[in-house]
Image: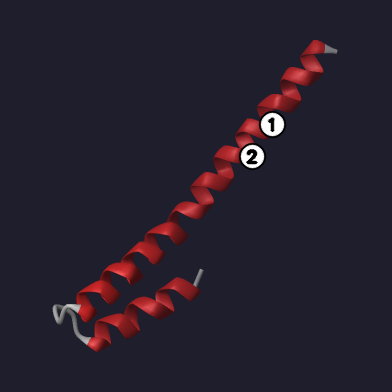
Amino acid sequence: MEVEIQRAYTKVERTKSMVQVATQPLRLRQEGEGLVTNCLTHGVALRSEQSQATPMRYKM
């Protein structure tokens, strides 16, 4: 019984790790979009750079 519980726990931990890895690109895209938006607000970026950053977020 203890072995079965350990196996189930290992599977849960592996799944959590896989979910974290899978969400990293989304977080990076969101961060990039936020940076471009901030730069645009402060006049450092062009509007075309913002329009390029936004579609990248939705291609996933």
Q: Which mark is residue 40?
A: none
Location of residue 51 with respect to 27 vertically, above or below: below
Q: In terms of image quadrants, where is residue 12?
A: top right
Q: Name the residue located 42 percent from the left edge and 80 percent from the top edge.
A: 55
Check the picture and name the quadrant holding the N terminus. top right
17 left or right, relative to 25: right
Q: Amino acid at mark 1?
A: Lys
Horizontally, residue 21 falls left or right of residue 34, namely: right
Cα separation between marks 2 and 1: 6 Å
Are dots 2 and 1 in contact, CB under 8 Å? yes
Q: Nearer the viewer, residue 44 or 15?
A: 44
**Image coords of residue 41 (percent x, y):** 23, 80
How many other residues sit within 10 Å of disc 2, few (<14), some (14-19) or many (≥20)?
A: few
Mark 1, other Cα within 10 Å: few <14 / some 14–19 / many ≥20: few
Which image quadrant is residue 25 in? Answer: bottom left
Residue named by callout 2: 15
Q: Is residue 46 above or below residue 14?
A: below
User: In the image, what residue type sits under mark 2?
Assistant: Thr
Residue at 57% of width from left, 43% of height from top?
18
Query: Residue 46 falls in which quadrant of the image?
Result: bottom left
Question: Number of marks in the image?
Answer: 2
Question: In this image, 22 relative to 36: left or right?
Answer: right
What kind of element bears circle 2? helix
